[in-house]
Image: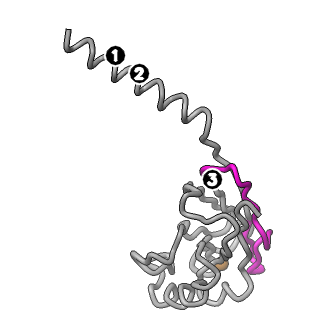
């Protein structure tokens, strides 16, 4: 008797969570390329207001190795961007040029070299609609050129 009641509750809550994920979850895929000329293919990445998750793919369309022309994709508030980029240089290649355990880093991919790509997912709950966010490559010397704005729900 008690067991079947528990079972019903478990089944019902499972059904409800399945329904809510169907109704509300929306993964939005975005992609960007980096090349051997130290350039990103985009200076702005729009993310629609109803996206609950972003699936970002960074592709290195060049040929140079990661040690010479590595690219990553790091997202911070625009106000934090320069300080995090500088800290990333200090963090060095062993940390993908991203400061470790730094709360200012919203999300960061690994470094990729020519011909490689990487995909990362992050929830938009980490973002505020209309907030000012900058994405950049934190490889030393790249972030003055390789940067742009991520616009969530703008
Ligand atoms: Cu780069």
The mark nearer the N terminus, 1 or 3, is: 1
Pointer 1: what residue?
Answer: 8
| Circle 1 or circle 3, nearest the eye | 1
Pointer 3: what residue?
Answer: 55
Residue 148 at x, y percent in the picture: 74, 76
- Residue lying at 46% horizontally and 90% vertically, measured from the top left: 90
Pointer 2: what residue?
Answer: 12
Q: Looking at the rendering, in which quadrant would you find the C terminus? A: bottom right
Residue 13 at x, y percent in the picture: 40, 27
Q: Examine the rendering and report whether any part of residue 103 can be seen.
A: yes
Image quadrant where residue 65 sits? bottom right
Q: Is residue 39 magenta?
A: yes
Q: Examine the rendering and report whether any part of residue 120 can be seen.
A: no
Q: Is residue 7 above or below residue 26?
A: above
Gap in Å between the C-alphas at discs 1 and 3?
Answer: 35 Å
The mark nearer the N terminus, 3 or 2, is: 2
Q: Residues within 10 Å of mark 1 (few under 14, many from 20)?
A: few
Q: Is residue 12 above or below residue 126?
A: above
Horizontal side of residue 141 vs 2, given as left or right: right
- Residue lying at 60% horizontally and 72% vertically, measured from the top left: 75
Image quadrant where residue 39 sits? bottom right
Q: In the rendered structure, which segment of residues is drawn in magenta?
A: 33-54
């Amino acid at each position: 008797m008690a067991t079947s009641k528990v079972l019903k509750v478990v089944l019902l809550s499972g059904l409800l969570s399945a329904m809510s994920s169907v109704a509300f979850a929306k993964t939005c895929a975005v992609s960007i390329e980096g090349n051997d000329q130290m350039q990103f293919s985009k200076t702005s990445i729009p993310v629609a207001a109803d996206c609950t998750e972003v699936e970002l793919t960074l592709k290195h369309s060049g040929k140079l190795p990661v040690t010479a022309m590595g690219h990553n994709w790091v997202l911070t508030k625009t106000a934090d961007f320069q300080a995090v980029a500088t800290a990333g240089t200090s963090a060095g290649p062993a940390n993908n040029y991203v400061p470790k355990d730094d709360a200012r880093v919203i999300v960061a991919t690994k470094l990729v070299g020519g011909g490689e790509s990487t995909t990362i997912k992050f929830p938009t709950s980490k973002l505020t609609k209309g907030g000012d966010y900058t994405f950049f490559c934190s490889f030393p010397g790249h972030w003055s050129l390789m940067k742009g704005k991520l616009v969530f729900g703008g």
